[in-house]
Image (cartoon, rainbow, N blue to C red):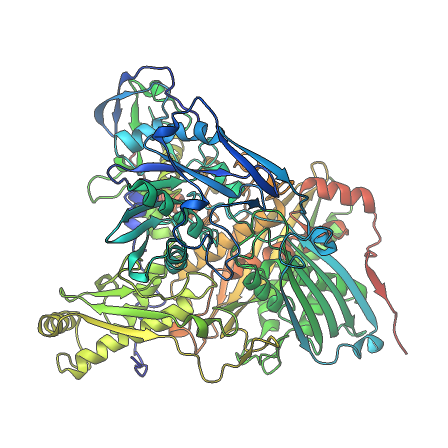
Amino acid sequence: MQIQGVEMNSNRIVGKSVPRKEGRHKVTGRSKYVDDMVLPDMLFGATVRSQIPRGRIRKITFNPGIAWDEFVIVSAKDIPGKNCIALIGDDQPCLANEFVNHPEEPILLLAHPDCHVLPKAVEAVSIEYEPLPAIFTIEQSERRSEVVWGEDNIFKTYLIEKGDLDGVWEKADHIVEGEYTTGAQEQLYIENNGMIAAFDAAEGITVWGSLQCPYYVHKALMTLCDLSAEKVRVVQMETGGAFGGKEEYPSMIAAHAALLAIKSGKPVKIIYDRMEDMAATTKRHPSRARHRTAVSKDGKILGGEIDFTIDGGAYLTLSPVVLSRGAIHAGGPYYWPSVRIHAKAVATNAPPHGAFRGFGAPQSLFAMERHMDRIARAVGLSPVEIRRRNFLQPGQTTTTEQVVREPIDLGKLLDRALEVSDYHAKKQRFANESRLGATKKGMGIAAFLHGAGFTGSGERNLGSVVGVEGCADGSVRVLVSSTEFGQGTKTVLSQIAAEALALPYENVSMAQPDTSEVPNSGPTVASRTVMVVGKLVQSAALGIRQTLISSKLLGEIYSADEFRAACQDYVAGRGEFQCWSRYETPSDIFWDDQKYRGEAYAAFAWAVYIAEVTVDLTTYSVSVDDFVALQEVGKVLHPLLARGQIIGGIAQAIGFSLYEKVVWQNGRMQNSQMTNYIMPTSSDLPPIRVLFEELGNVYGAYGAKGIGELPMDGPAPAIVNAVEDALNVPFDSIPLLPEDIMDGLDKDGLAATGQDRGVCSRGVVR
Amino acid sequence: MTDSREGRARAEISFSVNGEPKTVHVYPMERLLDVLRQQLQLSGTKEGCGEGECGSCAVLMDGILVNSCLVPVLQAAGSSVITIEGLSAGETLHVLQEAFLECGGAQCGICTPGMILAAVHLLNGTPEPTTQEIREGLSGNLCRCTGYSQIIDAVAEAARRGTTA
């Protein structure tokens, strides 16, 4: 239903920090997560996984000492439909049949009524392999000495081209080169993955689980079980953190639970323990970015070449989309008269890397923002000035030639962040203080942007649908498959519906995401929920209002009681009362999927972050002492939740920068425990000062843009730039651990001249 | 997970949970966490790591904050255990629960029960903590959502209002 927007004369709900919808349940321990759910006669499932990175399965032996007849055992042969986890491609098997392509690849499934006997049974399955050579790095994959995927190990490439790059090198006063790498990062939601499946020949399969995207799981189960859409039901339970880590992998666990449920005829619960969750499920893609930039003597970027490569692991999964976002963000918030961005996702024999907050952008923006500091040094300008001279201005175009239409003033954002952080005074003071002593301090800046919603034609292809229901009791219910996993989806979408209907927030409830009850409002990813889904909620809610008004049950101006009575009358008289709203691409959005050119995102959020660090020259540890995060995210619909999103993202990004190192050996994570994979505790984090600018955005619900991923992008380069400021030694890889700093200082010596490796300056052309 | 029950007989163990006497028939080395969640249906106590790192399973045992995933239930015999379910009285929330709600201290909610119990423990010993004392007092409880700031705000706010745990 298409309804003209109604101008509301008050903002009494949107913009207010109303209580979190499910908050009382969360603080009292009453919320039901999947592991809190028990079904009668339920079995417990476990997964037998590959112990080697690549090879052919020769023989499977069930060793004696286990009462195997008590177990339900599922192999690839038991799959009723297609043996794949349907997503973008169908290359990832649900259970390995003949070949394994990464450590921890699922091969067999076991179920038993007693969960305690499962670990021993898993150990008692011996698998004999014929090992095949495996590859573990981007460089090994590029060399193609072993082709482990497709014909060339390449999942996807993109080329973004703008302007005449070939002509700029001659004109350049400086050509600045750099290479930057980022490591894998574990999402480390505190609730491990889990699923329960139940099967009934008449009803089909039902799964309940910890997940972000009910309809991804729905699609995967239809393909795997060869069932029609109405025979598959996916229900999201309260989800204890996700961060992208529960975007695609839950389809795998749901598939496993479903197969065991079909074979046993009983409900089956699979809950991963921490080690299995960390070792077997997805992580952030490791990346390598190479920049070669032509710069004029006054510090203007003339053009550049950016090579951005990510390690996708053994199967395609979401790598093409992660690569796309990484490539589009690779040029940062700067104006490039000409640019050529080569982006490539390659295969290795690690478990597939996947979605994680920021989705490729934290990787490519780390490179861009480190490179800006390198350019500043080469040209002889300050980190502040080099950015100021190159910021995108309204009317200019991005690397994909999207015209910046928002009245964004990045220079002003920068000024405010500098002022709040007391940047100049501190930088001066640290430079004077730090010459001697056991600690050195530094300041670092990152400026960046993050596109909200799916890229390019993505939202059009999704065609999300949202419903709002007027209930028999006169209350209102929002029907979306968008999920809550800490961000506040239920709260903010309720606010939007309440605002549109001019009703109290308490009168709006959210349906549990259940594919038998809610339409496909798209996945809960890509900072799209408030901006894209929220706009649809607003529109569907206005449909409810308009229907009641045009059916003469309600006047144009009404009280909450009058609305309730009108809604009750409508349902009593005419039955079910639901209004739907489907995403329609704004007519002025143009995107060319072939040339990768056009309006990449309906809106960008913009930000300047400033980090203050201390480096201890005895322990080589870095502490972040102060952090200023200034962003423009459109209208802030819920200040408390928005601030929570920003601080939480920064904390996770501080981990990405300084603590969280995945140690690999032959494609297997060696430190898959919270004792040896270190995330920040409350003692490790600085006070984080969050500031919002509100330009307003005509596109999203009540002017909101995306916010969830943005804070993941900036902290790493800001912190590493601050470390360089403190030590006068460049570091271009994260995580940056004390041993890396020790090595870097050994190499460069403390009295480094500041001459960067990898910089070749041509001097001034006269 | 190791099989904590192999070759052992069940024992009768009595202890108090949230002020109520409980007697359970359990394998002595079963984790207190599992006994609370499975036998006593107190699913508010969560498992995050199973090795005492994350604090999601934290409960109070005789007033001491323990990770219930590391406590064999045998050790709890005769003790008084408080879980998240024991903090609120009906619909009346504990001051820390109120403060967590108001200050945005709970996001996904999975660390929240353990975090609130850690905060109860902190405020019992240090009723007026400094920010640094709060940071240190909660550093055994991991939260991946909040970056801790709003949790620290909540604990400071609860301390300001005064607690009765």
Q: Position of residue A734 (x, y in %)?
A: 66, 50
Residue placed at 74% from the left, 58% from the top?
A179
Front position in the image: A537 or A756: A537
- Residue B13 position (above or below residue A398): above
Q: Nearer the viewer, residue A407 or A35?
A: A35
A658 or A255: nearer the viewer: A255
Q: Is residue B102 left or right of residue A365?
A: left
Query: Dividing the picture into quarters, in which one does residue A256 lie?
Result: top left
- Outermost residue on the right side: it is A766
Left or right relative to A44: residue A403: right
- Name the spot of residue A170 as percent of width and height, x first: 85, 77
Considering depth in this image, is A466 or A693 the residue closer to the camera? A466
**Left or right of A255, for residue A611:** right
The reply to whether residue A107 is visible in this rendering is yes
Q: Compared with residue A127, is residue A728 higher up or lower down, i.e. above or below?
A: below
Q: From the image, which quarter does the N terminus of chain A lie in?
A: bottom left
Image coordinates for residue A725, horizontal then vertical, percent? 72, 54
Indicate the quadrant where residue A530 lies. Answer: bottom left
**Image position, residue A425 (x, y; %):** 67, 58
* Image vertical order of residue A58 relative to residue A571, above or below: above
Whether residue A421 is visible = no
How many numbered callouts?
0
- For the C terminus of chain A, the image quarter is bottom right
